[in-house]
């Protein structure tokens, strides 16, 4: 029998796969894994088909189809006022997950320390572990999941190599502000510390607020990999196309890894996205589109014993269930799926410490009728 010494001994299937499988098994309304249950624009599908028929079916250039890189750079300049060179400072990736892994692999060596926030998205730590890096976590503040920058400063050491930020934030829906960016500038000025800024929900910010990107701050831009994803932007999580913006020196290192990890990304889809980006209403309308869903769902949840937290961006919201059950959040999400027919994600899985304060995450990127169906089930849940 071969003996396998796992490089990631503490990992099993992700909670997203687990809860989606359980939802399917039980016929539950699936508000767990973050993906829309409505389709993307038919025009985008026509464009992909058009480019397949046109013969765009062989390898794309390693950094991505130039037309797409040019369109993204134009969009970023318009939205964030940040200028990136389409040939030397952007790479098209197989989703944000690959971009995050590639950026980490291109800079992290054994014993380098990486500052992450607790809770955070689940793909960061395994990538750091695989490179031999050490995850150092700073807890987000309990009331609104904002950052205490003094806590970040306390974690700094001569080994600190990278800070990973995420705005809008999955799973808490918190967003970073101009104040946060200035704190980040103060902390990193004069150092060789890199930043990965995971901005996959950059088009989904609510209540008239503007997305604040590290790209807009020259002092941060020079040390940052800014990562986003078309999965979230155009309701195509299954197409797995994203991108990484970074200054030339960082992009050069990023591409050394990218070249041997995937080499290049789905060609016809890149051409289709380049054409589709010409109509900026396709992404400018997203804030309103998702805000209506957030408002409908959070107002409905407020008529139940769940205590809903404010959500300022992304397509998730958190709710506390202490008035309903004393179970662990993992057990509670299982019970909610099996007994009440609504699947969600327990918040503790996003914490390195597995901190459980009885919160669950709902994904509201769903058809109106799906959200209504979930509400019909949730309103019957009684306070204990
Ligand atoms: N970062 C965050 C914060 C996410 O929520 C997700 C999941 N959509 C990703 C990265 C991965 O994105 P992609 O599906 O494009 O790999
Ligand atoms: N980003 C999605 C979420 O947070 C899940 C992506 C995945 O399943 N890996 O639900």
Image (cartoon, rainbow, N blue to C red):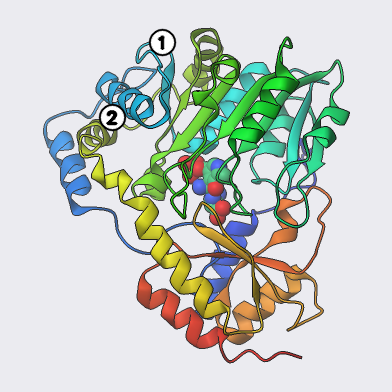
172 to 54, vertically: above or below? below
Q: Are marks 1 and 2 in contact (CB under 8 Å)?
A: no
**What is the x, y in percent for residue 138?**
80, 40
Measured Cα–Cα span from mark 1 to mark 2: 19 Å
* Viewer-proximal residue among 25 and 270: 270
**What is the x, y in percent for residue 139?**
80, 45
Q: Residue at x 64, y 34 (%)?
A: 179
**What is the x, y in percent for residue 115?**
76, 31
Question: Mark number for residue 88?
Answer: 1
* Viewer-proximal residue among 357 and 134: 357
Q: Residue at x 28, y 19 (%)?
A: 66
- Is residue 275 shown left or right of residue 247? left
Report which residue position mark 2 lands on. 267
- Is residue 214 shown left or right of residue 81? right
Question: Mark number for residue 336?
Answer: none
| Sooner in the amino-acid sequence: mark 1 or mark 2 | 1
Residue 135 in sight in this render:
yes
Q: Residue at x 70, y 55 (%)?
A: 144
378 to 370, vertically: above or below? below
* Viewer-proximal residue among 181 and 69: 181
Q: Secondary structure at mark 2?
A: helix
Question: Few, some or many C-alpha atoms within 10 Å of disc 1 (few <14, some 14-19, many ≥20)?
Answer: some
Quarter occupied by residue 356: bottom right
Quarter occupied by residue 293: bottom left
Residue 24 in sight in this render:
no
Q: Quadrant of the N terminus?
A: top right
**What is the x, y in percent for residue 286?**
35, 51
Q: Secondary structure at mark 1?
A: loop
């Amino acid at each position: 029998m071969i003996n396998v010494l796992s490089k990631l001994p503490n990992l099993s299937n992700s909670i997203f796969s687990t809860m989606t499988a359980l939802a399917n098994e039980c016929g539950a309304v699936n508000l767990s894994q973050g993906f829309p249950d409505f389709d993307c624009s038919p025009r985008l599908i026509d464009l992909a088909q058009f480019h397949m028929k046109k013969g765009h079916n062989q390898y794309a250039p390693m950094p991505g189809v130039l037309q797409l890189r040019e369109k993204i750079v134009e969009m970023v300049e318009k939205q964030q006022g940040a200028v990136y060179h389409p040939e030397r400072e952007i790479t098209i990736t197989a989703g944000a997950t690959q971009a995050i892994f590639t950026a980490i692999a291109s800079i992290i060596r054994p014993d380098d320390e990486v500052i992450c926030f607790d809770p955070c998205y689940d793909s960061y730590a395994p990538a750091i572990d695989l490179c031999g890096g050490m995850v150092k976590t700073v807890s987000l503040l309990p009331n609104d999941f904002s950052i205490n920058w003094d806590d970040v400063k306390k974690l700094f050491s001569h080994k600190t190599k990278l800070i990973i930020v995420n705005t809008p934030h999955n799973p808490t829906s918190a967003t970073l502000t101009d104040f946060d960016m200035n704190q980040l500038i103060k902390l990193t000025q004069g150092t060789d510390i890199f930043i990965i800024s995971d901005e996959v929900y950059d088009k989904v910010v609510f209540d008239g607020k503007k997305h604040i990107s590290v790209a807009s701050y020259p002092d941060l831009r020079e040390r940052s990999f800014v990562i986003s994803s078309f999965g979230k932007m155009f309701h195509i999580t299954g197409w797995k196309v994203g991108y990484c913006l970074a200054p030339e020196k960082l992009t050069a290192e990023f591409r050394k890894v990218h070249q041997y990890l995937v080499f290049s990304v789905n060609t016809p889809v890149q051409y289709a996205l380049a054409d589709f980006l010409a109509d900026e209403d396709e992404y400018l309308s997203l804030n309103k589109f998702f805000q209506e869903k957030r408002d409908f769902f959070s107002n409905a949840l407020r008529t139940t014993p769940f205590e809903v937290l404010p959500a300022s961006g992304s397509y998730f919201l958190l709710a506390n269930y202490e008035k309903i059950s004393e179970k662990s959040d993992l057990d509670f999400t299982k019970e909610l799926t099996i007994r009440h027919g609504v699947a969600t994600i327990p918040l503790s899985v996003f914490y390195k410490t597995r901190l459980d304060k009885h919160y669950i995450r709902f994904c509201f990127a769903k058809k109106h009728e799906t959200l209504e169906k979930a509400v019909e089930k949730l309103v019957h849940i009684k306070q204990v």
